[in-house]
Image: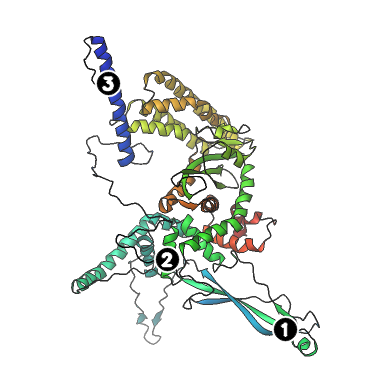
């Protein structure tokens, strides 16, 4: 209907209809504006918080001038005349001489001449070199100050004064405090990630403690800052450089050549015995298993793009191009880690419960597709109570139903997913819905109301009760002869089902009263359409109320995606899916990813492709480490 009909009707009933129609349209537009403002400026958390209606909205002005983020595959374009392209510097067959060397001596199994059975003597050596990484080692520094007394007078006690510390009474050394500060401000590692990395080494340090250390370091550096400021002001020219040191060393594989003196004197042909070269993760590459693990963890756990990692190697005096790092990632995935991935995939299909979801990813160079096309990472995860925690990502160019069907096959267990119809096409599975998706829609509806309250808040009270019951069910102790799953089912039937019945009656009552195109109308419609799947969790104690377990794992992938933005090729996207799967599975199993990758990348090249690798799966790695 036009905004102002010309001429306006004279009938009061028609004018009333026009006014009511405009009021509905105006209310819908206001709700959309409020929702979009909440998405831009409001909190991302789904927790309900009180909002002060008198607080003004922050005006950020025009955001169109914000520069684009850096990525892994596009180099910044400089203004001005085009410069000549420099040929990239590479290490081909030789590693920098300044790096420390350590040797691994590889001897043949026997030093007895196969011809005459005399002892062989060394006639030469073959030496090969590979780049190795030494990970950070957390240790405890003990300061010992003996006390000395005089036996003659016994009145004097001498003891060396305690050395000054960066923090009085603190348990951290100067080197440790410097490491935390450099990791945060030079490597852009947030303190919560550093706390996670230290926890993987067995050292639990709160993020607030790390922040206090950084504050103390800044206080000490303030003296240096003032001195540097005075120096800069006294100089006609200022030059600044940022230097970050990465410790690297070269592994030399030394293989002696042995020959038989007896055969040399009496025989025509003198046999020469040389120990075989150990199988390398990437034949012909300078990267050892430790180096590959270092690169994979920094990209897929710490979220460091490959171009930034290449800069770190460059500063260490080891020029490794971004392309070479990409080949390391793809090669590690295709040659070795895909074997772990396939074994985990077979184990996942045998799980009684699987969580499923999908998220977007962009691939630039894909056949018959535009660079701006949207592809997908399909995510799968075992249940929270599984003895073999598994998280897998599967790269696919689309969002069709053929992809989960191809991955899960004829899966007959329980499948948790959102309301997307592609998941529901698996005929043999028992499907359950995600209560968090329904709750999230009512939260979005609440954000459109500047004063809060109303139907969205009434619905959220039902959800609050349902989730409180879930927390109580987890702590409920089973009765004699009852399993934990049966106990949870009994508790839900007793407490959750009545609340669900009340929620259904409330939804049926309010559905005709809300606008279908509004946020509250969408929330009510979604919940009613998915009701059968949303309530099925009360029938089986093994089922989860929502899909948040998998969504938390996908958030790790989404955080990394903000750094590298896209994959250059399909092979790179598939490799990312494999590596992310193994990293997320390690996270679910409580396995330190760097130690695990160093182990499997050293072990897998030694094993034939048809060899059993069950002992190398992440949930078995913890058992082997404990043994």
Q: Are marks 3 and 1 in contact (CB under 8 Å)?
A: no
Residue 617 coordinates in the image, percent (x, y): 61, 54
Cα distance, mark 3 to mark 1? 99 Å
- In the image, taking residue 351 as reference, residue 213 lies left or right, namely left
Q: Secondary structure at mark 1?
A: strand
Q: Are marks 1 and 2 in contact (CB under 8 Å)?
A: no
Residue 106, compared with residue 426, is above or below; it is below
Residue 313 visible here: yes
Q: Are marks 3 and 2 in contact (CB under 8 Å)?
A: no
Q: Secondary structure at mark 2?
A: helix
Q: Secondary structure at mark 3?
A: loop
Residue 201 visible here: no
Residue 516 coordinates in the image, percent (x, y): 39, 23
Q: Residue under circle 2?
A: 312
- Badge 2 local density, few (<14 within 10 Å), some, or many (20+)? some
Answer with mark 3 or mark 2, whichever residue precedes in sequence. 3
- In the image, taking residue 376 as reference, residue 540 lies left or right, namely right
- In the image, taking residue 432 as reference, residue 20 lies left or right, namely left
Residue 208, compared with residue 534, is above or below; it is below
Is residue 389 or residue 368 the one in the foreground?
A: 368
Residue pictured at 40% horizontal, 68% vertical = 86
Q: Residue under circle 1?
A: 259
Answer with mark 3 or mark 1, whichever residue precedes in sequence. 3
Is residue 574 or residue 340 the one in the foreground?
A: 574
Q: Residue under circle 3?
A: 2
In which quadrant of the rendered view does residue 259 lie?
bottom right
- Badge 1 local density, few (<14 within 10 Å), some, or many (20+)? many
- Badge 3 local density, few (<14 within 10 Å), some, or many (20+)? few
Cα distance, mark 1 to mark 2? 45 Å
């Amino acid at each position: 209907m036009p905004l102002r009909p010309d001429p306006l009707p004279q009938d009061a009933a028609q004018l009333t209809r026009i006014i009511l129609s405009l009021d509905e349209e105006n209310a819908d537009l206001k709700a959309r504006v409020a929702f979009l403002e909440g998405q831009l400026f409001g909190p991302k958390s789904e927790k309900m918080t009180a909002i002060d209606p008198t607080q003004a909205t922050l005006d950020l002005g025009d955001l169109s001038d914000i520069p684009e983020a850096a990525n892994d595959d596009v180099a910044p374009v400089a203004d001005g005349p085009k410069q000549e392209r420099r040929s990239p510097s590479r290490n081909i067959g030789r590693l920098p001489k300044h790096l420390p060397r350590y040797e691994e001596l590889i001897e043949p199994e026997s030093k007895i001449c196969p011809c005459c059975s005399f002892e062989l003597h060394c006639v030469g050596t073959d030496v090969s070199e590979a780049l190795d990484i030494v990970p950070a080692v957390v240790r405890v520094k003990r300061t010992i100050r003996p006390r000395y007394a005089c036996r003659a007078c016994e009145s004097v006690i001498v003891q060396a004064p305690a050395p000054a510390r960066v923090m009085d009474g603190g348990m951290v050394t100067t080197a440790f405090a410097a490491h935390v500060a450099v990791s945060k401000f030079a490597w852009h590692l947030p303190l919560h990630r550093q706390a996670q990395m230290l926890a993987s080494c067995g050292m639990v340090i709160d993020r607030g403690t790390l922040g206090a250390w950084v504050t103390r370091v800044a206080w000490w550096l303030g003296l240096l800052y003032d001195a540097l400021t005075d120096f800069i002001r006294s100089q006609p020219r200022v030059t600044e450089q940022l230097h970050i040191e990465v410790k690297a060393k070269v592994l030399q594989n030394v293989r002696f050549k042995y020959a038989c003196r007896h055969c040399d004197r009496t025989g025509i042909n003198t046999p020469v015995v040389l120990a075989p070269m150990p199988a390398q993760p990437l034949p012909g590459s300078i990267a050892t298993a430790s180096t590959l693990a270092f690169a994979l963890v920094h990209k897929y756990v710490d979220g460091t793009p490959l171009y930034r990692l290449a800069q770190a190697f460059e500063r260490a005096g080891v020029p490794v191009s971004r392309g070479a790092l990409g080949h390391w990632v793809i090669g590690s995935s295709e040659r070795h880690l895909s074997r772990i991935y396939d074994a985990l995939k077979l184990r996942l299909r045998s799980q009684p419960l699987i969580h499923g979801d999908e998220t977007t990813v962009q691939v630039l160079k894909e056949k018959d597709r535009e660079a701006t096309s949207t592809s997908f990472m399909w995510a799968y995860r075992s249940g929270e109570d599984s003895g073999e925690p598994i998280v897998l990502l599967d790269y696919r160019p689309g969002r069709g139903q053929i992809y989960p069907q191809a991955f899960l096959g004829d899966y007959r267990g329980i499948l948790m997913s959102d309301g997307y119809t592609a998941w529901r096409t698996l005929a043999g599975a028992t499907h359950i819905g995600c209560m968090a998706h329904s709750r999230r829609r009512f939260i979005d509806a609440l954000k459109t109301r500047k004063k809060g309250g109303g139907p969205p808040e009434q619905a959220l009270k039902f959800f609050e009760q349902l989730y409180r019951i879930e927390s109580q069910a987890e702590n409920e102790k089973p009765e004699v002869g009852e399993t934990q799953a049966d106990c949870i089912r009994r508790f839900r039937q007793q407490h959750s089902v009545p609340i669900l019945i009340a929620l259904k009656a409330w939804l049926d009552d309010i559905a005709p009263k809300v606008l279908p195109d509004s946020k509250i109308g969408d929330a009510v419609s979604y919940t009613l359409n998915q009701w059968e799947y949303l309530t099925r969790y009360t029938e089986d104690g093994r089922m989860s109320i929502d899909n948040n377990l998998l969504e938390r794992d996908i958030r790790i992938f989404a955080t990394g995606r903000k750094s590298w933005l896209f994959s250059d090729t399909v092979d790179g996207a598939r490799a990312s899916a494999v590596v992310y799967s193994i990293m997320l599975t390690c996270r679910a199993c409580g396995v330190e990813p760097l130690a695990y990758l160093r182990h499997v990348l050293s072990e897998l090249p030694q094993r034939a492709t048809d060899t059993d690798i069950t002992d190398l799966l992440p949930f078995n790695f913890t058992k082997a480490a404990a043994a």
